[in-house]
Image (cartoon, rainbow, N blue to C red):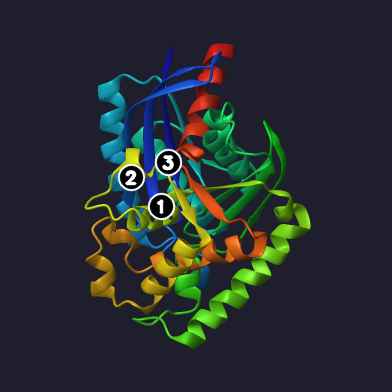
């Protein structure tokens, strides 16, 4: 087993996984998995730059993660940065800060690379399941972008599009609660992005929809009626299209305080969860899939698998 660390820095959150990995079997034993909402992408869609306060929140989380990685003795680390840092004019400032704190250069990956990691992390442990038909459609709803990947054991097609819970919330300047006109505008935006995704990814061919990231896991926690966030209960739970529709409507019509009072709601998702839920619902409507399989394993796990493989090969 090889002890590895993986960091995924997205538009809304930064996450860490420290794990023992066996590259020969694909087995991954999680030792520490954590997440901080840092909103690195705050205002990027409007200004094209990473805000100073967003950078500082991100660097504060990195300092915490550096201590955790050191405590666990993980010698192999990979830091992957996604949508917000791809788009920012001042991303060199972000890169320098990460190098100073963690000693590794963040890899600003493309949407297609992000999709590949997400697919590997989400589907590796589904391979032996007889109740889930292939091909899989893995949908990773992030803060700034959403990745669509179709594949069996390996990726057949992938596309990243610029819709995410933070980007939509900021782009449409959502009120509290969201108005019907804003919902219609978001739906039109999402439909256009799905048209783009379908140019590269055969969404209709999917037999099993697998949903990833905080929007999907939060909607699952609400559907399950959990009193607090329970990763084990959420992982591989299944949500029907009807459940997703009801929850999306509830979140979009609720006030900030009503959303904040939901037991599984992370404070950093309160303002953006409605847009994220609408993306998930729109995907299910477009593909006609009756349910979504929720996965707690995603891009982080895919990064960790590759780090372990590289450590063994190197």
Q: Which of the two residues, 73 or 190, is positioned nearer the viewer here?
A: 190
List x then y, in percent, for residue 182.
49, 83
Q: Which of the two residues, 178 or 134, is positioned nearer the viewer here?
A: 134
- Could one spot residue 314 in this view of the protein? no
Residue named by callout 3:
296
Local SS, label 3: loop
Query: As displayed, is residue 153 above or below residue 310?
Result: below
List x then y, in percent, for residue 72.
29, 22
Residue named by callout 1:
214
Query: As displayed, is residue 29 above or below residue 50?
Result: above
Query: Disc count in the image?
Result: 3
Instruction: Give the CA distance from mark 2 to mark 3.
Output: 12 Å
Seen at 30% across and 53% down, the residue is: 57
Seen at 45% across and 41% down, the residue is: 236
Residue named by callout 2:
35
Local SS, label 2: strand
- Quarter of the image with the C terminus in it: top right
- Could one spot residue 173 in this view of the protein? yes
Seen at 52% across and 68% down, the residue is: 45
List x then y, in percent, for residue 230.
29, 44
* Label 2 Cα neighbours within 10 Å, binned few <14 / some 14-19 / many ≥20: some
Left or right for 98, reference 90: left
Instruction: Give the CA distance from mark 2 to mark 1.
Output: 10 Å
Q: Which of the two residues, 277 or 267, is positioned nearer the viewer here?
A: 277
List x then y, in percent, for residue 186.
54, 76
Local SS, label 1: helix
Mark whose residue sits in front, 2 or 3? 3
Query: As displayed, is residue 139 above or below residue 151?
Result: below
Q: Which of the two residues, 282 or 155, is positioned nearer the viewer here?
A: 282
């Amino acid at each position: 087993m090889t002890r590895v660390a993986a960091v995924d820095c997205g538009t809304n959150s930064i996450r860490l996984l420290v794990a023992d990995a066996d590259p020969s079997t694909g087995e991954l034993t999680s030792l520490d998995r954590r997440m901080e909402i840092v909103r690195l992408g705050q205002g990027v869609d409007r200004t094209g730059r990473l805000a100073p306060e967003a950078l500082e929140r991100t660097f504060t989380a990195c300092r915490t993660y550096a201590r955790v990685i050191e405590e666990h003795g993980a010698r192999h680390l990979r830091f992957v940065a996604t949508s917000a840092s791809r788009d920012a004019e001042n991303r060199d400032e972000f890169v320098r800060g990460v190098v100073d704190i963690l000693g590794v250069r963040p890899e600003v990956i493309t949407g297609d690379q992000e999709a590949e990691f997400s697919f590997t992390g989400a589907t590796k442990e589904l391979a032996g399941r007889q109740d889930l038909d292939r091909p899989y459609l893995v949908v990773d709803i992030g803060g700034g972008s959403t990745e669509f990947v179709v594949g069996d054991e390996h990726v057949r097609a992938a596309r990243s599009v610029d819709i995410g819970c933070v980007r939509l919330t900021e782009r449409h300047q959502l009120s509290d609660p969201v108005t019907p006109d804003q919902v219609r505008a978001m739906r039109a935006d999402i439909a256009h992005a799905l048209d783009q995704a379908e140019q590269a990814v055969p969404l209709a061919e999917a037999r099993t929809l697998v949903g990833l990231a905080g929007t999907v896991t939060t909607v699952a926690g609400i559907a399950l009626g959990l009193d607090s966030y329970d990763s084990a209960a959420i992982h591989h739970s299944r949500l029907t299209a009807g459940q997703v529709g009801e929850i999306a409507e509830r979140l979009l019509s609720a006030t900030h305080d009503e959303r904040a009072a939901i037991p599984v709601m992370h404070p950093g998702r309160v303002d953006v969860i409605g847009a994220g839920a609408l993306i998930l619902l729109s995907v299910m409507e477009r593909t006609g899939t009756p349910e979504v399989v929720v996965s707690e394993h995603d891009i982080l796990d895919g990064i960790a698998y590759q780090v372990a493989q590289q450590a063994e090969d190197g």
